[in-house]
Image (tube, helix red, strand yellow):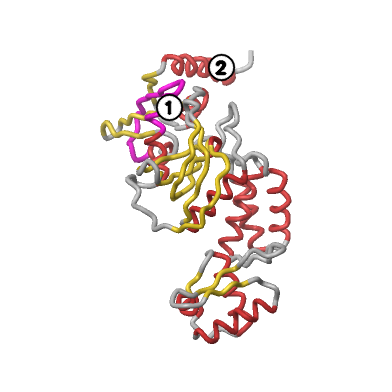
Amino acid sequence: MANTSSRTLRLLSLLQTRRYWPGPVLADKLGVSPRTLRRDVDRLRELGYPVEASRGVDGGYQLAAGASLPPLILDDEEAVALAVGMQAATQGATSGIEEAAARALAKVVQVMPARLRRRVDAVRAVTVPGSWGGAPGPAVDPDVLSVLAQACRDAERVRFRYTAHDGADTARHAEPLRLVSLGRRWYVVAYDLDRTDWRSFRLDRVTGPRGTGARFRPRELPAEDAAAFVRAGITRIPASHAVEALVEAPAAAVRERMGRWFVVEELGPERTRVTMTTDDLSWPAMALGVLGEEFEVVSPPGLRTLVGELATRFARAAAEPA
């Protein structure tokens, strides 16, 4: 059995990973008896951590919100992931939190042991922000992102207002499953309780989300994963441009590099169709250009024109000086 101090830290770490822990499950995780668990919880309370307990058959523990943010217990992988995520936030991944993310990143890296700082620095050095240039994506309210992320984590039903692509404003009651960052937009995939069907909602069109306190058992999503569900939905929404191109490469290779943004369809061993809808043709032009494979633009004509203009511009840039 671990000594009391290390076990207390382990207990704090577990309480921070989940909103609620049934007592027997938590005791089993720590390898202690329910009585020892109660003593460890009391020790955390003496240290100032607001641990709440509920009694009864389904009794358990949860770390309540305190007057200030308690120290977080992170393992190596969590610390590196947190630092890299905050680095992305400082580069505008979510509008409005760049400065706060920079301050938080400085604090986290400052207290990291040298071995973790080296890992974080290595990842940051070879990571390029996932923007294709052009106009930035729609701004997402950090509070909207935070509320929905917590609801996904805790399997909690939410209510919010949503503005559809046609401008219709409606009230929604949903069971959120996953957040998806696709291209330059954020989405939440959720089961719409009023419409009794799955939906994906753009976060920049969501306002006033709030948890209802009602828990739910996650339903089975009718797609390979949440990102695939969002991509399929995007293809059904009218957009400024419907893009189609043929790529002279195996579908598996194309899907690995472009499957996050394009719908990929195998046409043969070395031929693949990619499609998407977009309001900015410069983005698919750049995506196809950096793929590194021969391709043919099927539609729209405007994309063919843009690719031709880019090709001419690049050829001039690559020409030997006179």
Mark 1: few/some/many CA within 10 Å (<14, 14-19, 20+): many
Which portion, as a residue range, is magenta? 234-254
Q: Is residue 26 above or below residue 77?
A: below
Q: Is residue 220 left or right of residue 316?
A: left
Q: Nearer the viewer, residue 199 or 82?
A: 199
> How many dots with numbers?
2
Q: Amino acid at mark 2?
A: Arg
Q: Does the CB distance between marks 1 and 2 fall below 8 Å?
A: no
Q: Quadrant of residue 83?
A: bottom right
Residue 313, label in figure: 2
Q: Give the residue number, with chain letter if any, for mark 1.
A: 277
Q: Give the x, y percent position of residue 199.
A: 40, 40
**Does the segment drawn in magenta span residue 249?**
yes
Q: Amino acid at mark 1?
A: Thr
Q: Give the x, y percent position of residue 177.
A: 44, 50
Element at label 2: helix
**Does the segment drawn in magenta span residue 178?**
no
User: Which residue shows up at 26% across the image and 32% down it?
Assistant: 268
Q: Quadrant of residue 108?
A: bottom right
